[in-house]
Image: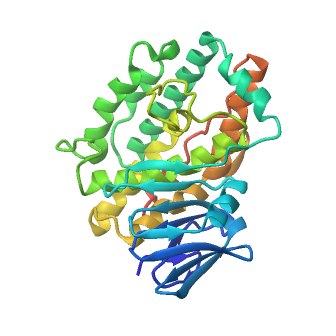
Amino acid sequence: MEGIIGHVNLSRLACAGENPLDQIIDISQEGRHLSRDRGFLKVESDGKTIGRVPLDHISAVIVHTHGVTWSNSLLVELADRGAPVVLCATNHQPRAVICSLEGHHMQNARMRAQWDAPQPLIKQAWKQIVISKITMQATALAAISQPRAPLDMIARNVQSGDNGNAEAQAARIYWPLMMGKSFRRDVDLPDINALLNYGYTVLRAATARAVVAAGLHPTIGLFHSNRANAFALADDLMEPFRPLVDLTARAIAAEAGPKVSSEAKNRMAGLIALDLPLIGETSPLSVALSRLAVSLAQSFEAKRLILALPKPPSPLVLSGLGR
């Protein structure tokens, strides 16, 4: 079994996310054929239908195996709905993303504003994102009864553009406390590193969708600027949400081991439905990503920073992630 779609068991197909309108489809077995069928994504094996999901309910499709085929009409329908298709390597790291070229009716104007954004604005935006990430890391540590004070101190001293490299300073303290002294974050290592890779892939797909839907160009990042990275901006905006994946991976590994199983994938994909405090209310993580991307687009247009960054959930919510 590859997993579950919502609350309905479907053989050899995986989807996760508690909100039926915001689902991640995961394909991880050979021999699957994906196609469009009257408003549904249809999955077949050996000519037999094994699952159907309404296209309007799909947030992203993640493919982990090379023996998969699909129809062009399906890819076009997914693109029209802003649902990215993420192609992964065996270590669950994304290698390619198929995403819509048109995301917003003001796309041209917003991309021009994004391209012309002054460096001081970009540096201040990255500073706020780094502060938000470190604050989320500190709260995550507190949720597992680890000291947060060192990270809170670092967060208070982040410079414009993070010129002092506070993000790296925080990481050196954070990872041993989160995962143990022997842990080393390496995307090419197995076990819990592979589990983190998968969780970040889910988060990256949801962020890429939010970026394109906001009318921004995903390649033009604030900080991540590798010329080979087509989704640099998604990598920037997902940073504050990464500790949610870390806590989930830690809990899964402690309970069932670090294998990237169907159940582990379902729990990771369920993060996009997690409620986060945001501007006086709570919103699912997928909505928080959309608001953050839109607020950045508006900041570029106004040339004034108005980022809608998430606030950490309660320690009780955080301590329950992945369980």
Q: Residue 230 at x, y = what percent?
A: 51, 37
Q: How many marks?
A: 0
> Residue sitting at 46 percent across and 27 percent down?
227
Look at the picture and state if 207 lies above or below 117: below
> Which quadrant holds residue 24?
bottom right
Q: Residue 81 at x, y = what percent?
A: 71, 57
The residue positioned farthest toward the front in the image shown: 72
Q: Is residue 120 visible?
A: yes
The front one of 117 and 195 is 117
Q: Is residue 29 left or right of residue 100?
A: left
The residue positioned farthest toward the bottom in the image shown: 48
> Which quadrant holds residue 290?
top right
> Residue sitting at 73 percent across and 21 percent down?
113
The residue positioned farthest toward the right in the image shown: 105
Q: Quadrant of the C terminus?
A: bottom left
The front one of 145 and 168 is 168
The front one of 269 and 251 is 269
Look at the picture and state if 115 lies above or below 254: above
Q: Quadrant of the N terminus?
A: bottom left
Q: Residue 156 at x, y = what percent?
A: 48, 19
> Residue sitting at 56 percent across and 16 percent down?
123
Q: Is residue 323 visible?
A: no
The front one of 261 and 248 is 261
Q: Is residue 241 left or right of residue 292?
A: left
Q: Residue 149 at x, y = what percent?
A: 38, 29
Q: Is residue 259 left or right of residue 310?
A: left
> Residue sitting at 23 percent across and 49 percent down?
189
Look at the picture and state if 56 lies above or below 216: below
In this figure, which colouring scheme has been used for the structure? rainbow
